[in-house]
Amino acid sequence: MRFFVRLLAWFAILVVDVAAFGVGMGRIGVVVGVAFAILSTLWMWFWLPGSAHRAFDRGLLDRAARRYRYVGALAFTPSRERAALLSRAGCHVAARRIPLAERLLARLDPAKLDAAERAVWLNNRACAQLESGSDPHAALALAEEATVLRPDVPAVQHTRGMALLAVGRIDDAISVLDGMRAGGELSPRLEAERCRDLAAAWERKGQTAYAEDYRLRAAALAR
């Protein structure tokens, strides 16, 4: 029902725009109104989600969260709305606003999520537990379950590496974090986080030279 309400609302806005231009400017107004309607739709479906992703990758978490909220508010499909909600929760986890992230995640029924959505949901919950300092073994279990669903996603592997580090499995953590780049280059934000975690892991192994190298890499990426 919500889908049809939003669709009708969006269609009504476009019709009013076209009609207003048509009445005021004749045939040219209709053309301008149609062009505006097309551009507005393209903005809603393509530019807005992409700009939210780019803001998140640059570490602009508040901006990304706002844009994901707009994406969710304008969503015409349940899957698009769920994706926006999961992304908003991820922004709040990254910003260490854990209670807010958990409230958003609680709005989703994991039994109704597809494999990709469930992997994100599990990953966000694991990150929230790690950030809040709660049971790292529970966080690792969530990360492992997410990895089974989406082993190809570097962010999921990163969470798994952090969880392994938190439970003291240092060598396993280093192996997972080293393997994150197997599928290609990471975003600067994720690469910086990977380097910081590797620095912590090598520090705990007593390898200060390796640790310092990764700290310098992380600092360079954070500029």
Image (cartoon, rainbow, N blue to C red):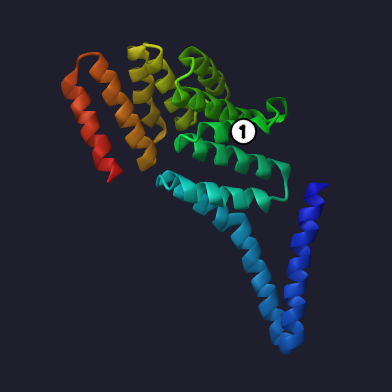
Name the residue rendered at 19%, 17% in the picture: 207
Mark 1 nearby-residue class (10 Å; few <14, some 14–19, many ≥20) = few
| 123 with respect to 77 (left or right) | left
SS for callout 1: helix
| 62 with respect to 81 (left or right) | left
Type of the residue with mark 1: Arg
x then y, percent, for residue 169: 37, 11
Name the residue rendered at 58%, 56% in the picture: 46
Q: Which quadrant of the figure has residue 23? A: bottom right
x then y, percent, for residue 117: 62, 32
Name the residue rendered at 59%, 37% in the picture: 86
Q: Nearer the viewer, residue 3 or 185?
A: 3
Up the image or down, 49 lies above or below 143; here it is below
Up the image or down, 49 lies above or below 175; here it is below
Name the residue rendered at 62%, 67% in the picture: 39
x then y, percent, for residue 191: 35, 36
Specify the farthest residue to the left. 209
| 36 with respect to 129 (left or right) | right
Specify the farthest residue to the front. 99
Up the image or down, 178 lies above or below 93; here it is above
Up the image or down, 157 lies above or below 185; here it is above
x then y, percent, for residue 16: 76, 73
Q: Which quadrant of the figure has residue 175? A: top left
Number of marks present in the image shown:
1
Q: Which quadrant of the figure has residue 203? A: top left
**Residue at numbered disc 1:** 103
Q: Which of 163 and 132 is in front in this view?
A: 132
